[in-house]
Protein backbone atom coordinates (compact mmCIF):
# COMPACT_ATOMS: atom_id res chain seq x y z
CA UNK A 1 0.00 0.00 0.00
CA UNK A 2 0.91 3.62 -0.48
CA UNK A 3 2.06 5.65 2.55
CA UNK A 4 0.98 9.21 3.27
CA UNK A 5 4.62 10.32 3.36
CA UNK A 6 4.96 9.25 -0.31
CA UNK A 7 2.05 11.37 -1.50
CA UNK A 8 2.12 15.01 -2.63
CA UNK A 9 -0.46 16.69 -0.40
CA UNK A 10 0.15 20.36 -1.27
CA UNK A 11 -3.10 22.18 -1.95
CA UNK A 12 -5.04 18.89 -1.99
CA UNK A 13 -8.31 18.13 -0.24
CA UNK A 14 -7.17 15.46 2.21
CA UNK A 15 -9.64 13.30 4.13
CA UNK A 16 -8.14 11.49 7.13
CA UNK A 17 -10.08 8.57 8.66
CA UNK A 18 -8.73 8.40 12.20
CA UNK A 19 -9.82 6.33 15.21
CA UNK A 20 -10.74 9.02 17.71
CA UNK A 21 -13.05 6.66 19.59
CA UNK A 22 -11.73 7.63 23.03
CA UNK A 23 -13.28 6.67 26.37
CA UNK A 24 -15.30 9.37 28.15
CA UNK A 25 -16.86 9.67 31.61
CA UNK A 26 -20.54 10.31 32.40
CA UNK A 27 -20.04 14.04 31.91
CA UNK A 28 -18.61 13.42 28.41
CA UNK A 29 -15.04 14.28 29.43
CA UNK A 30 -12.25 12.36 27.72
CA UNK A 31 -10.60 9.96 30.18
CA UNK A 32 -7.79 8.67 27.96
CA UNK A 33 -6.48 10.69 25.04
CA UNK A 34 -3.91 8.18 23.74
CA UNK A 35 -5.70 7.76 20.42
CA UNK A 36 -6.02 11.52 19.91
CA UNK A 37 -2.31 12.08 20.56
CA UNK A 38 -1.39 9.16 18.29
CA UNK A 39 -3.53 10.61 15.49
CA UNK A 40 -1.96 14.09 15.46
CA UNK A 41 0.98 13.16 13.23
CA UNK A 42 -1.22 12.59 10.17
CA UNK A 43 -3.04 15.88 10.72
CA UNK A 44 0.21 17.82 11.15
CA UNK A 45 1.68 16.19 8.04
CA UNK A 46 -1.32 17.32 5.97
CA UNK A 47 -1.46 20.81 7.49
CA UNK A 48 2.29 21.37 7.07
CA UNK A 49 1.98 20.37 3.42
CA UNK A 50 -0.71 23.02 2.90
CA UNK A 51 -3.61 20.64 2.40
CA UNK A 52 -7.26 21.40 3.12
CA UNK A 53 -7.71 18.84 5.90
CA UNK A 54 -10.87 16.94 6.84
CA UNK A 55 -10.75 14.39 9.65
CA UNK A 56 -13.46 11.92 10.54
CA UNK A 57 -13.87 9.05 12.99
CA UNK A 58 -16.51 6.85 14.50
CA UNK A 59 -17.39 7.46 18.13
CA UNK A 60 -19.19 4.74 20.06
CA UNK A 61 -21.81 2.63 18.37
CA UNK A 62 -24.66 5.02 17.50
CA UNK A 63 -27.75 4.24 15.50
CA UNK A 64 -27.23 5.27 11.87
CA UNK A 65 -29.22 8.34 10.86
CA UNK A 66 -30.07 9.14 14.48
CA UNK A 67 -27.05 10.58 16.30
CA UNK A 68 -27.81 11.41 19.93
CA UNK A 69 -26.12 14.20 21.91
CA UNK A 70 -23.78 11.65 23.54
CA UNK A 71 -22.56 10.47 20.12
CA UNK A 72 -20.88 13.73 19.17
CA UNK A 73 -17.17 14.18 18.51
CA UNK A 74 -17.42 17.73 19.96
CA UNK A 75 -15.14 17.00 22.98
CA UNK A 76 -12.59 15.53 20.56
CA UNK A 77 -12.75 18.65 18.33
CA UNK A 78 -11.97 20.78 21.38
CA UNK A 79 -9.01 18.62 22.38
CA UNK A 80 -7.67 18.60 18.80
CA UNK A 81 -7.88 22.40 18.63
CA UNK A 82 -5.80 22.64 21.83
CA UNK A 83 -3.24 20.11 20.63
CA UNK A 84 -2.88 21.62 17.15
CA UNK A 85 -3.03 25.22 18.39
CA UNK A 86 -5.64 26.24 15.81
CA UNK A 87 -9.41 26.12 15.43
CA UNK A 88 -10.91 22.72 14.58
CA UNK A 89 -14.55 23.37 13.71
CA UNK A 90 -16.90 20.40 13.93
CA UNK A 91 -18.99 19.95 10.76
CA UNK A 92 -22.26 18.20 11.59
CA UNK A 93 -24.17 17.45 8.36
CA UNK A 94 -21.11 17.01 6.28
CA UNK A 95 -22.68 15.04 3.44
CA UNK A 96 -24.84 18.10 2.72
CA UNK A 97 -23.52 21.34 1.20
CA UNK A 98 -22.98 24.50 3.18
CA UNK A 99 -19.46 24.10 4.53
CA UNK A 100 -15.94 24.34 3.17
CA UNK A 101 -12.34 24.03 4.24
CA UNK A 102 -9.43 25.94 2.72
CA UNK A 103 -5.80 24.85 2.26
CA UNK A 104 -4.02 25.20 5.61
CA UNK A 105 -7.26 24.68 7.55
CA UNK A 106 -8.63 21.62 9.34
CA UNK A 107 -12.18 20.54 10.18
CA UNK A 108 -13.53 17.53 12.06
CA UNK A 109 -16.44 15.75 10.36
CA UNK A 110 -18.99 14.48 12.90
CA UNK A 111 -19.19 10.79 13.88
CA UNK A 112 -19.09 8.89 10.59
CA UNK A 113 -21.20 6.10 12.09
CA UNK A 114 -24.12 8.53 11.92
CA UNK A 115 -24.17 8.11 8.13
CA UNK A 116 -26.74 5.63 6.88
CA UNK A 117 -24.89 2.80 5.13
CA UNK A 118 -21.61 3.18 7.06
CA UNK A 119 -21.71 -0.24 8.76
CA UNK A 120 -22.78 -2.08 5.61
CA UNK A 121 -20.07 -0.36 3.52
CA UNK A 122 -22.77 0.97 1.19
CA UNK A 123 -21.13 1.88 -2.17
CA UNK A 124 -23.30 4.98 -2.70
CA UNK A 125 -22.29 6.35 0.71
CA UNK A 126 -18.61 5.49 0.10
CA UNK A 127 -18.71 7.26 -3.26
CA UNK A 128 -20.19 10.43 -1.80
CA UNK A 129 -17.60 10.50 1.01
CA UNK A 130 -14.80 9.89 -1.51
CA UNK A 131 -16.08 12.80 -3.63
CA UNK A 132 -15.07 15.18 -0.82
CA UNK A 133 -11.36 14.51 -1.26
CA UNK A 134 -8.41 14.24 -3.62
CA UNK A 135 -6.47 12.06 -1.17
CA UNK A 136 -7.95 9.62 1.34
CA UNK A 137 -5.74 8.73 4.28
CA UNK A 138 -6.63 5.78 6.47
CA UNK A 139 -4.91 6.24 9.82
CA UNK A 140 -7.46 4.31 11.92
CA UNK A 141 -5.63 1.16 13.02
CA UNK A 142 -8.13 0.70 15.87
CA UNK A 143 -10.93 0.30 13.31
CA UNK A 144 -8.89 -1.57 10.67
CA UNK A 145 -10.88 -4.77 11.36
CA UNK A 146 -14.16 -3.10 10.44
CA UNK A 147 -15.33 -3.41 6.81
CA UNK A 148 -17.24 -0.11 6.95
CA UNK A 149 -17.73 2.59 4.30
CA UNK A 150 -15.25 5.12 5.74
CA UNK A 151 -12.64 2.34 6.06
CA UNK A 152 -13.05 0.24 2.92
CA UNK A 153 -15.46 1.76 0.41
CA UNK A 154 -13.86 5.20 0.41
CA UNK A 155 -10.49 3.64 -0.41
CA UNK A 156 -12.12 2.12 -3.49
CA UNK A 157 -13.59 5.38 -4.79
CA UNK A 158 -11.11 8.06 -3.71
CA UNK A 159 -8.76 9.34 -6.44
CA UNK A 160 -5.84 8.30 -4.20
CA UNK A 161 -5.82 6.20 -1.01
CA UNK A 162 -2.90 5.79 1.38
CA UNK A 163 -2.00 4.73 4.93
CA UNK A 164 -1.40 7.42 7.55
CA UNK A 165 1.65 7.34 9.84
CA UNK A 166 -0.14 5.66 12.76
CA UNK A 167 -1.63 2.87 10.67
CA UNK A 168 1.74 2.39 8.96
CA UNK A 169 3.62 2.31 12.29
CA UNK A 170 1.20 -0.26 13.73
CA UNK A 171 1.53 -2.49 10.68
CA UNK A 172 5.32 -2.10 10.64
CA UNK A 173 5.61 -3.08 14.33
CA UNK A 174 3.22 -6.01 14.06
CA UNK A 175 4.87 -7.08 10.81
CA UNK A 176 8.27 -7.03 12.53
CA UNK A 177 6.85 -9.31 15.24
CA UNK A 178 5.16 -11.78 12.91
CA UNK A 179 6.53 -11.67 9.39
CA UNK A 180 9.99 -13.18 9.56
CA UNK A 181 10.43 -12.33 13.28
CA UNK A 182 13.74 -12.67 15.04
CA UNK A 183 13.51 -15.84 17.12
CA UNK A 184 12.85 -17.04 19.73
CA UNK A 185 9.41 -15.48 19.34
CA UNK A 186 7.52 -15.58 22.65
CA UNK A 187 3.82 -14.74 23.01
CA UNK A 188 2.07 -14.10 26.31
CA UNK A 189 -1.70 -14.50 26.21
CA UNK A 190 -3.49 -13.86 29.47
CA UNK A 191 -7.06 -13.10 30.40
CA UNK A 192 -10.00 -14.86 31.90
CA UNK A 193 -11.24 -17.19 29.19
CA UNK A 194 -9.81 -19.57 26.62
CA UNK A 195 -13.08 -19.27 24.66
CA UNK A 196 -12.62 -15.55 23.89
CA UNK A 197 -9.03 -16.09 22.74
CA UNK A 198 -9.21 -19.57 21.23
CA UNK A 199 -8.51 -18.53 17.65
CA UNK A 200 -5.61 -16.34 18.82
CA UNK A 201 -4.12 -19.25 20.80
CA UNK A 202 -4.50 -21.59 17.83
CA UNK A 203 -2.99 -19.13 15.42
CA UNK A 204 -0.05 -18.34 17.73
CA UNK A 205 0.54 -22.04 18.42
CA UNK A 206 1.47 -22.43 14.76
CA UNK A 207 3.94 -19.54 14.81
CA UNK A 208 5.59 -18.88 18.17
CA UNK A 209 8.41 -20.68 20.00
CA UNK A 210 6.93 -20.27 23.48
CA UNK A 211 3.32 -19.58 24.33
CA UNK A 212 2.94 -18.33 27.91
CA UNK A 213 -0.65 -18.48 29.09
CA UNK A 214 -1.97 -16.54 32.07
CA UNK A 215 -5.07 -15.92 34.17
CA UNK A 216 -8.14 -18.10 33.69
CA UNK A 217 -6.65 -19.29 30.40
CA UNK A 218 -3.74 -20.84 32.32
CA UNK A 219 -6.20 -22.55 34.69
CA UNK A 220 -7.81 -24.39 31.79
CA UNK A 221 -4.35 -25.44 30.55
CA UNK A 222 -3.38 -26.61 34.08
CA UNK A 223 -6.55 -28.68 34.26
CA UNK A 224 -5.81 -30.12 30.82
CA UNK A 225 -2.35 -31.09 32.11
CA UNK A 226 -3.96 -32.97 35.00
CA UNK A 227 -3.25 -30.42 37.77
CA UNK A 228 -5.70 -29.68 40.59
CA UNK A 229 -7.20 -26.19 40.28
CA UNK A 230 -9.82 -26.26 43.06
CA UNK A 231 -12.58 -23.75 42.43
CA UNK A 232 -10.56 -21.63 39.99
CA UNK A 233 -12.22 -20.12 36.92
CA UNK A 234 -11.69 -22.53 34.02
CA UNK A 235 -13.54 -23.91 31.00
CA UNK A 236 -13.74 -27.72 31.27
CA UNK A 237 -15.40 -27.83 27.81
CA UNK A 238 -12.18 -26.62 26.28
CA UNK A 239 -9.74 -29.14 27.74
CA UNK A 240 -9.38 -30.91 24.40
CA UNK A 241 -8.68 -27.59 22.71
CA UNK A 242 -6.00 -26.81 25.31
CA UNK A 243 -4.45 -30.26 24.86
CA UNK A 244 -4.49 -29.83 21.07
CA UNK A 245 -2.66 -26.51 21.39
CA UNK A 246 -0.02 -28.03 23.69
CA UNK A 247 0.38 -30.99 21.31
CA UNK A 248 0.69 -28.68 18.33
CA UNK A 249 3.41 -26.70 20.06
CA UNK A 250 5.24 -29.86 21.18
CA UNK A 251 5.15 -31.26 17.63
CA UNK A 252 7.00 -28.13 16.48
CA UNK A 253 9.58 -28.43 19.26
CA UNK A 254 7.93 -25.42 20.92
CA UNK A 255 6.28 -25.29 24.35
CA UNK A 256 3.55 -23.92 26.59
CA UNK A 257 5.32 -23.44 29.93
CA UNK A 258 2.84 -23.79 32.82
CA UNK A 259 3.23 -22.24 36.29
CA UNK A 260 5.03 -24.22 39.01
CA UNK A 261 3.57 -22.19 41.85
CA UNK A 262 0.44 -20.11 42.17
CA UNK A 263 -1.16 -17.54 44.48
CA UNK A 264 -4.59 -18.63 45.69
CA UNK A 265 -7.42 -17.31 47.87
CA UNK A 266 -10.76 -18.62 49.08
CA UNK A 267 -12.78 -15.82 47.50
CA UNK A 268 -12.60 -13.19 44.77
CA UNK A 269 -12.38 -9.90 46.63
CA UNK A 270 -10.12 -6.93 47.21
CA UNK A 271 -9.40 -8.07 50.80
CA UNK A 272 -9.11 -11.80 50.12
CA UNK A 273 -6.14 -13.33 51.91
CA UNK A 274 -3.55 -14.63 49.46
CA UNK A 275 -1.54 -17.88 49.97
CA UNK A 276 1.26 -19.32 47.92
CA UNK A 277 1.02 -22.97 46.78
CA UNK A 278 3.09 -25.33 44.66
CA UNK A 279 0.95 -26.02 41.59
CA UNK A 280 0.38 -29.67 42.64
CA UNK A 281 -0.95 -28.59 46.05
CA UNK A 282 -3.91 -26.40 45.10
CA UNK A 283 -6.74 -27.26 47.55
CA UNK A 284 -10.32 -28.14 46.69
CA UNK A 285 -11.60 -24.71 47.81
CA UNK A 286 -8.73 -22.63 46.43
CA UNK A 287 -9.07 -20.18 43.56
CA UNK A 288 -5.94 -19.31 41.59
CA UNK A 289 -5.53 -15.53 41.13
CA UNK A 290 -1.86 -15.14 40.17
CA UNK A 291 1.35 -17.00 39.42
CA UNK A 292 3.87 -17.44 42.22
CA UNK A 293 7.43 -16.05 42.39
CA UNK A 294 9.12 -19.18 41.01
CA UNK A 295 6.87 -19.12 37.95
CA UNK A 296 7.40 -15.37 37.53
CA UNK A 297 11.13 -15.94 37.69
CA UNK A 298 10.98 -18.69 35.08
CA UNK A 299 8.92 -16.46 32.77
CA UNK A 300 11.43 -13.63 33.24
CA UNK A 301 14.21 -16.04 32.21
CA UNK A 302 12.32 -17.03 29.05
CA UNK A 303 11.74 -13.37 28.16
CA UNK A 304 15.40 -12.50 28.77
CA UNK A 305 16.33 -15.06 26.12
CA UNK A 306 13.62 -13.98 23.64
CA UNK A 307 14.31 -11.97 20.48
CA UNK A 308 10.68 -10.98 19.87
CA UNK A 309 7.86 -10.68 22.42
CA UNK A 310 4.14 -10.20 21.83
CA UNK A 311 2.03 -9.49 24.92
CA UNK A 312 -1.74 -9.53 25.35
CA UNK A 313 -3.41 -10.09 28.70
CA UNK A 314 -2.41 -10.23 32.39
CA UNK A 315 -1.18 -13.25 34.39
CA UNK A 316 -3.47 -12.58 37.35
CA UNK A 317 -5.95 -10.25 38.99
CA UNK A 318 -3.51 -7.33 38.97
CA UNK A 319 -6.21 -4.85 40.03
CA UNK A 320 -5.87 -6.30 43.58
CA UNK A 321 -2.40 -5.71 45.10
CA UNK A 322 -2.08 -9.19 46.63
CA UNK A 323 -2.52 -10.75 43.15
CA UNK A 324 -0.52 -8.18 41.14
CA UNK A 325 3.04 -9.47 41.61
CA UNK A 326 2.97 -11.92 38.69
CA UNK A 327 1.75 -9.37 36.13
CA UNK A 328 4.11 -6.74 37.59
CA UNK A 329 7.07 -9.13 37.21
CA UNK A 330 5.95 -9.94 33.66
CA UNK A 331 5.68 -6.25 32.71
CA UNK A 332 9.17 -5.56 34.12
CA UNK A 333 10.64 -8.64 32.46
CA UNK A 334 9.31 -7.52 29.08
CA UNK A 335 10.67 -4.03 29.67
CA UNK A 336 14.09 -5.42 30.72
CA UNK A 337 14.36 -7.93 27.89
CA UNK A 338 16.57 -7.02 24.91
CA UNK A 339 13.82 -8.44 22.65
CA UNK A 340 11.70 -6.34 20.29
CA UNK A 341 8.41 -6.12 22.22
CA UNK A 342 4.86 -5.37 21.13
CA UNK A 343 1.85 -5.11 23.46
CA UNK A 344 -1.83 -4.40 23.02
CA UNK A 345 -5.35 -4.80 24.40
CA UNK A 346 -7.32 -2.94 27.06
CA UNK A 347 -6.20 -4.85 30.19
CA UNK A 348 -2.64 -4.96 28.95
CA UNK A 349 -2.53 -1.18 28.50
CA UNK A 350 -3.94 -0.77 32.01
CA UNK A 351 -1.21 -3.07 33.39
CA UNK A 352 1.50 -1.21 31.45
CA UNK A 353 0.22 2.05 32.96
CA UNK A 354 -0.03 0.63 36.48
CA UNK A 355 3.51 -0.77 36.45
CA UNK A 356 5.01 2.22 34.62
CA UNK A 357 6.83 0.30 31.90
CA UNK A 358 5.32 2.02 28.84
CA UNK A 359 8.54 3.79 27.87
CA UNK A 360 10.45 0.53 27.70
CA UNK A 361 8.12 -1.49 25.51
CA UNK A 362 9.02 -1.06 21.86
CA UNK A 363 5.52 -0.71 20.49
CA UNK A 364 2.17 -0.33 22.25
CA UNK A 365 -0.76 -0.78 19.90
CA UNK A 366 -3.69 1.66 19.88
CA UNK A 367 -5.93 -1.14 18.60
CA UNK A 368 -8.21 -3.26 20.79
CA UNK A 369 -10.20 -5.59 18.55
CA UNK A 370 -7.95 -4.80 15.59
CA UNK A 371 -4.84 -5.88 17.53
CA UNK A 372 -6.54 -9.13 18.54
CA UNK A 373 -7.66 -9.86 14.98
CA UNK A 374 -4.12 -9.25 13.78
CA UNK A 375 -2.89 -11.80 16.37
CA UNK A 376 -5.44 -14.25 15.03
CA UNK A 377 -3.74 -13.91 11.67
CA UNK A 378 -6.89 -12.53 10.05
CA UNK A 379 -6.44 -10.13 7.12
CA UNK A 380 -7.57 -6.63 8.16
CA UNK A 381 -10.18 -5.17 5.76
CA UNK A 382 -8.59 -1.71 5.93
CA UNK A 383 -5.25 -3.06 4.78
CA UNK A 384 -6.80 -5.12 1.99
CA UNK A 385 -8.68 -2.03 0.76
CA UNK A 386 -5.51 0.11 0.73
CA UNK A 387 -3.55 -2.64 -1.01
CA UNK A 388 -6.23 -2.94 -3.70
CA UNK A 389 -6.27 0.84 -4.14
CA UNK A 390 -2.48 0.92 -4.51
CA UNK A 391 -2.63 -1.45 -7.46
CA UNK A 392 -4.96 0.99 -9.25
CA UNK A 393 -2.82 4.12 -9.00
CA UNK A 394 0.83 4.87 -8.29
CA UNK A 395 1.24 8.64 -8.45
CA UNK A 396 4.07 9.13 -5.98
CA UNK A 397 5.89 12.28 -4.99
CA UNK A 398 8.79 13.09 -7.41
C1 LIG B 1 -12.17 0.18 19.38
O1 LIG B 1 -12.43 0.94 20.33
O2 LIG B 1 -11.71 -0.98 19.53
C2 LIG B 1 -12.29 0.72 17.99
O3 LIG B 1 -12.47 2.09 18.00
C3 LIG B 1 -13.35 -0.01 17.22
O4 LIG B 1 -14.60 0.26 17.78
P1 LIG B 1 -15.82 -0.73 17.47
O5 LIG B 1 -15.54 -2.00 18.19
O6 LIG B 1 -17.05 0.00 17.97
O7 LIG B 1 -15.87 -0.95 15.98
Image (cartoon, rainbow, N blue to C red):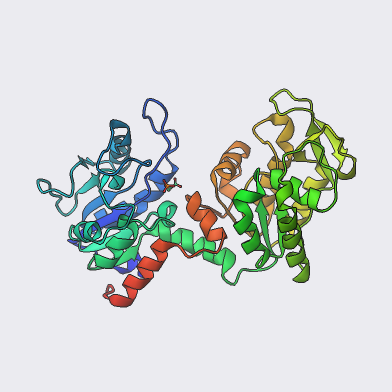
Residue at 41 percent of width and 33 percent of height: 24
Left or right: residue 155 versus residue 332 is: left
Residue at 30 percent of width and 55 percent of height: 150
Which residue reaches farthest left?
98
Q: Nearer the viewer, residue 258 or 106?
A: 258
Residue at 38 percent of width and 54 percent of height: 140
Q: Nearer the viewer, residue 317 or 358?
A: 317
Which residue reaches farthest front?
237
Left or right: residue 332 versus residue 79 is: right
Which residue reaches farthest right?
281
Relative image position of residue 190 (x, y in whole percent): 66, 48
Left or right: residue 352 versus residue 164 is: right
Q: Is residue 171 above or below residue 291?
A: below
Relative image position of residue 62 (x, y in whole percent): 33, 40
Q: Nearer the viewer, residue 123 or 135?
A: 123
Question: Can residue 394 be seen in the rendering of this structure?
Answer: no
Q: Nearer the viewer, residue 257 or 51?
A: 257
**For the N terminus, which image quadrant?**
bottom left
**For the C terminus, which image quadrant?**
bottom left
Q: Is residue 285 above or below residue 213?
A: above
Question: Can residue 343 be seen in the rendering of this structure?
Answer: yes
Amino acid sequence: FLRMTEVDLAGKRVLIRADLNVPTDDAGRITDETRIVASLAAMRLALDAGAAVMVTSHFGRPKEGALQPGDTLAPVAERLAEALGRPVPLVRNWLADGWSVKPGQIVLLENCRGNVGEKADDPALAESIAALCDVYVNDAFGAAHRAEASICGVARYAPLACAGPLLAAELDALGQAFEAPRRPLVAIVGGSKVSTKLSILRSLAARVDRLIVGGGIANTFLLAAGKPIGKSLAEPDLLDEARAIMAMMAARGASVPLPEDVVVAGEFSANAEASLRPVDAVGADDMIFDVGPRSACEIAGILQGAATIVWNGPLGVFEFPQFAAGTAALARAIADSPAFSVAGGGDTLAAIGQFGVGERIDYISTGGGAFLEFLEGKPLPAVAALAAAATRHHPRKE
